[in-house]
Image (tube, helix red, strand yellow):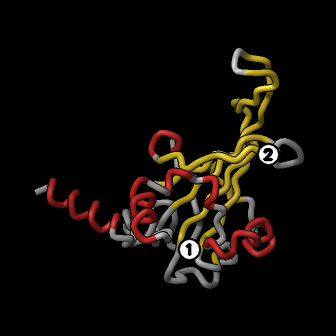
Amino acid sequence: MHRFYLIGLIIAATAGLSLAVADNGFSEYVDEQGNINLPEDFRSSMVHLGSWYVPEGGASGFHDVYTEQATVEAFRETGKFPDGATLVKELRSSHAGNYTTGSGVSYATADIKQWFVMIKDTQGRFTDNPLWGDGWGWALYQPGDRTRNVAASYKTDCLGCHVPAKANDWVYIEAYPTLTE
C-alpha cells in the first residue's frame, strides 16, 4: 500500500503538479501567513542545481543552488518550475591557492555569507504578504540567525537582481546543468 502511495507522489511530482507535503497543502517551508523557512540540511536532502562564482564585490564567492529532486524532474519534463518548488542559494566566501591543477585555484570556504530562498507560487496565495509576488515567495537569511528572514519586500530587496532573468521566470537557469538531461 505504501509503495503505491509513493509511486503516486512521484508521478504527481514529475508531471509538474504541486510538491505539497505540508498540512497547508503547499510547501513544508511556508507557514499559513506565507513566512518562508530556510530548509534544514538542504545540502544533503536536495539536489545541487549548479554554481556561480563571483570574483569581486559584496556578492563575491561561490553561489551554490539546490532544489528538490521532484522539481528537477518536473522542470525537465515541462521547462517550468512546479508549484511549491524550492530554490535555495547558499553564498560562501572563497579563497585561492596553488594546486597541482593550476595556480590561483578558487575554492569555497566554510564561511557562509547568506542564503536566498525562493518558493514557486503559481496560485498567488499570499497577495497581502510583501515577500510574495511575480510567481514566487522570496527570503534572505544571514548566518547570525537562520530563522529570521531579513528581507522586508521582494520588490525592493530581491527583484532588482532578478530583472535580467525575467524571461526565465526570474531565475538564472543557465548555470543549472542539472535541469537538463
| Amino acid type for the residue under numbered disc 1 | Gln
Between the C-alphas of marks 1 and 2, the distance is 34 Å
The picture places residue 113, in percent across and down from the top left corner, at 76, 43
User: Mark 1 sits on what residue?
Assistant: 33
The picture places residue 64, in percent across and down from the top left corner, at 63, 45
Q: Quadrant of the C terminus?
A: bottom left
**Observer-nearest of 89 and 99:** 99
User: Mark 2 sits on what residue?
Assistant: 54
Q: Secondary structure at mark 1?
A: loop
Residue 174 sits in quarter: bottom right
Residue at 70%, 20% (x, y): give it. Answer: 101
**Observer-nearest of 30 and 159:** 159
Q: Secondary structure at mark 2?
A: strand
Residue at 59%, 47% (x, y): give it. Answer: 50
**Residue ranking furthest to the top:** 100
Residue at 50%, 57% (x, y): give it. Answer: 179
**Observer-nearest of 74 and 29:** 74
Residue at 60%, 63% (x, y): give it. Answer: 118
Q: Nearer the viewer, mark 1 or mark 2?
A: 2
